[in-house]
Amino acid sequence: MIKTLCQLKEILNLDYPYYHRSGKKALILDILFSRERVYIWKYIKTMRYCDYYTTNKHKSLFHAFMYWWYLRKHNRNSVKLGLIIGAGAFDAGLCIYHTGNIVVNGYSKIGKNCKLHGSNCIGNSHCKDDCPTIGDNVRLGVGAKVFGKIYIANNVTIAAGAVVTKSCYEEGVTLAGVPAKIVKYGIQHET
């Protein structure tokens, strides 16, 4: 939940490096050749603004208008890219490598520096409150899914195609399989 403009700018600054390489030449080439990451960045940006105005829509008529404006932009970008992510689900440092078929329930709580590789689903099992809580520095491989009111610890890698339905309290492990279980210990992530 983003409460202040200062917090919004800080989160956007943490998200930005994942989508734009440094240097003016790289930025111009990304925009000129319409690279996928440029569109993902636009999606992330509207998602963050939507989160901010959702929190503050009752402050004034201007905030209420901006809430509807960014909600509309967020929904249009969702349809274009195949990303359905509830505003406020992710903390700072979200990295989406590929567009298409990523669904995240807005009631899920995901920590900092989460990395999604595509075709991921993070959602509830039966009712809207049965959503996962995922720690910091978690990486979901292609096709990885996390369902139910479960907890995933920090620094966990969820392998491609894994389906996680039970909590994992151990940090620095790899989960794989259907249903997922620990297959490797002692993973170190870069942040």
Image (cartoon, rainbow, N blue to C red):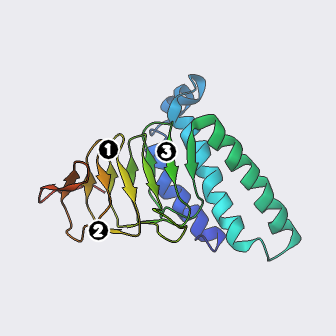
Mark 1: give few (<14), some (14-19) or many (20+) Cα within 10 Å.
many
Which one is closest to the eye, mark 2 or mark 3? 2
Q: Amino acid at mark 1?
A: Gly
Given residues 60 and 90, the one toward you in this image is: 90
Q: Quadrant of the N terminus?
A: bottom right
Q: Amino acid at mark 2?
A: Ser
Q: Amino acid at mark 3?
A: Ile
* In this picture, residue 190 sits left or right of residue 47: left
Q: Residue furthest bottom?
A: 59
The percent coordinates of residue 140 (x first, y second) are 34, 49
What's the distance in space between the residues labelled 1 and 3, CA to CA? 12 Å
- Up-down: is 6 above or below 13? below
Residue appearing at x 48%, y 31% in the figure: 26
Q: Which residue is mark 3?
A: 102
Residue 167 marker:
2
Question: What secondary structure is marked by label 1?
Answer: loop
Q: Residue furthest right?
A: 61
Q: Are marks 1 and 2 in contact (CB under 8 Å)?
A: no
Question: What secondary structure is marked by label 3?
Answer: strand
Q: Quadrant of the C terminus?
A: bottom left
First in sequence: mark 2 vs mark 3: 3
Place residue 41 in its image quadrant. top right
* In this picture, residue 114 sits left or right of residue 186: right
Which one is closest to the eye, mark 1 or mark 2? 2
Question: What secondary structure is marked by label 2?
Answer: loop
Q: Which residue is mark 1?
A: 141
Place residue 39 in its image quadrant. top right
